[in-house]
Amino acid sequence: MKGSSNKALCRCRQHPGRAARIRCLWVTCLFYSFGSFLRTIPYETLHPSCEEPWLRLLSDAGMDLNCTGLPSWQQMTRLYGTKPIIVGLERCAAYRQSVAAGVIPRIAGLYNTGTNALAKLFEANWNTDEMAWMLEGSYFKWDVPYGKHVPLHLRENVTVPARNPTPKDQVLPIVLIKDPFWWMQSMCKNPYGVKWPHHDHCPNLVDREGRPVAVTTKYTFGTPKKNNVQKFQIHYASLVHLWNDYYREYFDSPQPRLLIRYEDLLYHGPEVLTAISTCVGLTMPTFRYVTETSKTHGSGADFRQALTKYGNAAARLAPLTAADQQFARDMLDERLMTTFQYKYP
């Protein structure tokens, strides 16, 4: 603000005539004094329908300061706490010492966990000359070279054609995880390569006899014209087992990796990206939000819609039957649920 006021004063000095300069200086001082006064007023006074944390977040994102429809900040923190949760930061120093300079982290995560949103944040905040080759074309270049949705144990068996050239042993996976109850709702809407019977009810974790409903995940990479097509599929006992198995592998892996909650991208974006940047030795400028939808396929929510949706505790369990909820309570991995502070029904 000091720099802005100095520029305004300089412009006043350029006015011809003493009276005009005095009027300009008087108006400028009045304007900046009023601005300073406004900054002393609590956010809630200027926008009584909004809580201060929401107003700061919306203001920093350059969005309309309208909190209509947003959950209370306390409701959101009851679900996810007040600070980001990032697993793997203790391995960052060793990773930086073991890889070549300029190696950029790569993204992994199940379908519908915010992998595209993170890629967009990388592009918005790490746009440097050194990364120009990464920022040209599809943001699939940010994916781990074995495919971001592919389970970790298949890393050495799968190489996705036409993706980034970083050697697999140099990659730092940034793994996005989402609250399993919201994730299952997202899978109902956009199941992608995951197949299971759910036409009459979703997520349909158990059948009428209480038996788990199996799912199959199908993967296809490459193009027929280049004769490099890879196809395979993996079977899981249920949608819950898919979530458990995928994240348990990364959680237990001895390799450097970061596991980050999707919800923290929404509510604590600057802190999350600063932590990633520090981990890999990158300097991040002032954080820039991405407020439009990140998906180029299917349907996705923009930033405001996501803020509203994922803080709504009541809607989180709405589609699940009592049998689904009981199965989820029994089968969701306890270590993952505890570490990431996801609530059981």
Image (spheres, helix red, strand yellow):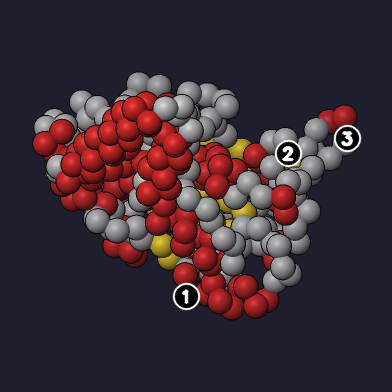
Q: Position of residue 325 (x, y in %)?
A: 24, 42
- Which one is in front in this view, the residue at disc 1 or the one at disc 2? 2
The residue indicated by pointer 1 is 90
Q: Which residue is mark 2?
A: 136
Q: How many marks?
A: 3
- Give me the residue at 46% from left, 27% from top: 16
- Residue 37, by quadrant, is top left
Number of other residues with Cα within 10 Å of mark 1, as a class: few under 14, some 14 to 19, many 20 or more: few
Neighbourhood count class around disc 2 (C-alpha, 10 Å): few under 14, some 14–19, many 20 upward: few
**Residue 68 placed where, x, y %?**
20, 26
Q: Position of residue 150 (x, y in %)?
A: 61, 49
Residue 54 seen from this side: no
Which residue is at the front of the view, 130 or 39? 39
The kind of secondary structure element at disc 1 is helix
Q: Mark 3 and mark 2: span between their CA atoms?
A: 22 Å
Marks 3/1: CA–CA distance: 42 Å
- Residues 188 and 112: in front is 112
Label at residue 226: 3
Q: Residues within 10 Å of mark 3 (few under 14, many from 20)?
A: few
Q: Earlier in the sequence, mark 3 or mark 2?
A: 2
Marks 1 and 2, the one that precedes in the sequence: 1
Q: Quadrant of residue 217?
A: top right
Q: Are marks 1 and 2 in contact (CB under 8 Å)?
A: no
- Can see residue 95? yes
Q: Residue furthest front?
A: 18
Q: Is residue 140 above or below residue 70?
A: below
Could you tell whether 65 is left or right of 314 in the image? Answer: right
Please state which amino acid type lies under the numbered disc 3: Lys
On screen, residue 273 versus residue 212, left or right, reads right
Residue under the image location 50 percent in, 40 percent down: 117
> Gap between marks 1 and 2, in whole Å?
32 Å
